[in-house]
Amino acid sequence: MRLFPCLLLVVFCACGSAPSRGGGDDGPDAGGAPPVDDDPLSGLPTGAAQWSAVCARHYGDMISAKFCAGAAPPSLTSLADLEALLGLTVRPNPNNDPTINANVRLTLNGESTGLGVRSVNPILARAFLMTPSPNSAPNASYQVLAFARGEPLVELVANDPAAQTLRFFLVRFHPACESTGCSNGDLQTAAIESGWTGYTLYDDRTIADTTLDCLNCHEPGGPGSKRILRMQELANPWAHWFYPERPDTLQIVQDFLAAHGGESYAGIPSSLVMPSRPAALTQLLQNNGFGTQPNVFDTLKINTELAAGGTSATWTGLYAQALAGQQIPPPYVDNPYDRTKEQAAITAYQQVLSGSLPRAQLPDLRDTFLDSALADMSIRPKPGLDGKGILVQMCQMCHNARLDQTLSRARFNVEQLAQVSRAEKDTAIQRLQLPPADRHAMPPARFHELSAAERQLAIDELMK
């Protein structure tokens, strides 16, 4: 299994990374199939060299301070090491002692609209560890760590009080399986959380022109605008988070616990999963100036509309903004999981934990969505779109005039498609035809997929 695997062998529309290759790479070799490079960070500096570059920027946030405190990169061989470095270790707390874990809060969610849109689910949940927020006051300094099993990536963010901005980071670590090939069992179980053979710390500046760009979502107004923390479901009842006080969200928590039993996840003891609440993250955002969210998912209003008539005008309005390429997609209107797929994944994971199924035989746990939900999640385009509509929905959020115009992907501006050069359009067409696992295929499998017919519609539009 690849470290950065695509979920399905499908063809994808151009979006999410630069249409123009640098370094004289003119695309596939007409004389034969080129090797597939599936690492979205391929070609960037690594290890100590990249650590030196980050530390030389002298950021004023608490994550930089901890990583750059010594003369060499900190030694990290596990997620636990990283959490300890940042002061985000979670300790078991059977008696709910308020003095235990006083420096960290936690929450989990079962659906992501970020990098994990196609991989996060109630079994491979996205865990958040964060600085506690005062009752109603902003934090002098704060940090958030986000991690989900499945990929060797940890997302980090901290505020920089001196610069009055947010600093985003990505830790790309190397699992022990990397040298011989990683199975689902290596990447989707507790095995991924330890045994690291190395890592690289990237800042948002370094990865800006990759498919893992932080600022596409967190600096939506473009360079010079306010950077934001995003939590589309900011208020109770948090339909896609671990929130056991409602039947539908209780099911998310129960599915997680049914699969994982008593094992810890992302350093979170099993006993603390049920008591966790998304209010911890909500409070951090509200207290620090992020209480007004773009395209906010008003769960209570949407649920009320669904209960009254089976549809939600509020959610439809959010989807329309994504359809027009103006906002990132909202979470699915309801629970997007296929119960049959999810139960099969739970059973397989239980079998691995019990030893009745070898870890190397664990099936892919990520594909648990309802097929009928994929278009509403903007993983697939809305049925019936023409080629221009497909490009707008699938690509415009990554290719628009708000981007840093020094990035190579800015040359493929879907908002002004008629002005895009013939050479850029031809490169985009070429990338429509790359193997899905190739890091140059746009978008990567983590975001969208197209049928062969939809692909041809997009190509026909680009041929104009």
Image (cartoon, helix red, strand yellow):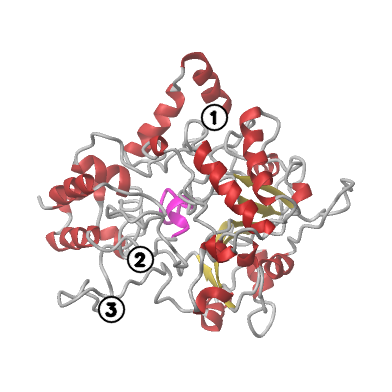
Q: Earlier in the sequence, mark 1 or mark 3?
A: 3
Q: Which residue is mark 2?
A: 439
Say left or right for 411 vs 126: left
Residue 410 marker: none
Residue lying farthest to the top in this orientation: 308
Residue at x 43% of width, y 70% of height: 41
> Which portion, as a residue range, is magenta?
213-225
In the image, residue 447 above or below residue 59: above
Residue type beneath disc 2: Arg
Magenta stretch, main secondary structure class: loop
Q: Position of residue 148 (x, y in %)?
A: 58, 56
Residue type beneath disc 3: Gly
Q: 56 or 44: nearer the eye?
A: 44
Q: Which residue is mark 3?
A: 23
Q: CA distance from mark 3 to mark 2?
A: 15 Å
Q: Position of residue 78 (x, y in %)?
A: 66, 70
